[in-house]
Image (cartoon, grey):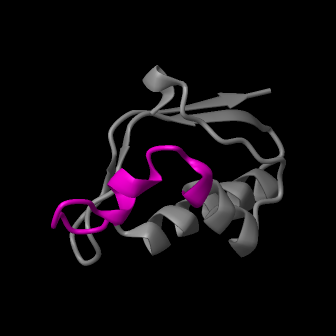
Amino acid sequence: MEVIRDVVFRLHPVGALHAREMVRQVRGFPLLAGTRGEASSDLDFLEQCLMRLSLLVSDHPEVSEIEINPLLVAPAGQPSAAVDVRVRLG
């Protein structure tokens, strides 16, 4: 959603509450939640990804930047995928 400038930022560390807020503050959230009979994306998976990225930064302070673009989040029970990932060490 970066193309349409629909982004949300948080400072590290990102816990469960922050991850939940981040997902729900994206203007495109209704699309993630499922509209017009479409299945909802796996929001728990998305929140877990945000928290685990925060843990990765905690465990590896040499990581200065992580970009995942796009992260395809499927409905629960279906495989999701990070299509392109860039990690910058500093």
**Residue at the spot 48% in from the left edge and 74% down from the top edge:** 44
Q: Main secondary structure of the magenta part?
A: loop
Q: Which residue: 54% across, 25% down? A: 5
Between 18 and 58, the one lying in front of the other is 18
The mark tally for this picture is 0
Asked if residue 20 lies left or right of residue 35, the reply is: right
Query: Where residue 75 sits: x, y (%)?
Result: 26, 68
Q: Which residues are magenta?
A: 24-41
Image point 24% across, 78% down: which residue?
Answer: 77
Q: Is residue 85 left or right of residue 89?
A: left
* Residue 12 on the magenta segment: no
Q: Relative to 11, is 45 on the left or the right?
A: left
Which residue is located at x 66 percent, y 42 percent? Answer: 8
Rendered position, 54 above or below 48: above
Which of the 4 image quadrants contains residue 51? Answer: bottom right
Q: Is residue 36 magenta?
A: yes
Rendering coords of residue 84 (x, y %): 39, 33
The reply to whether residue 51 is in sight is: no
Viewport quadrant of the N terminus: top left
Where, by quadrant of the figure, is residue 78 drawn?
Answer: bottom left
Could you tell me which quadrant the C terminus lies in? top right
Q: Nearer the viewer, residue 69 or 24?
A: 24
The answer to whether residue 66 of the structure is visible from this angle is: yes
Is residue 43 or residue 86 the one in the foreground?
A: 43
The answer to whether 43 appears left or right of 73 in the picture is: right
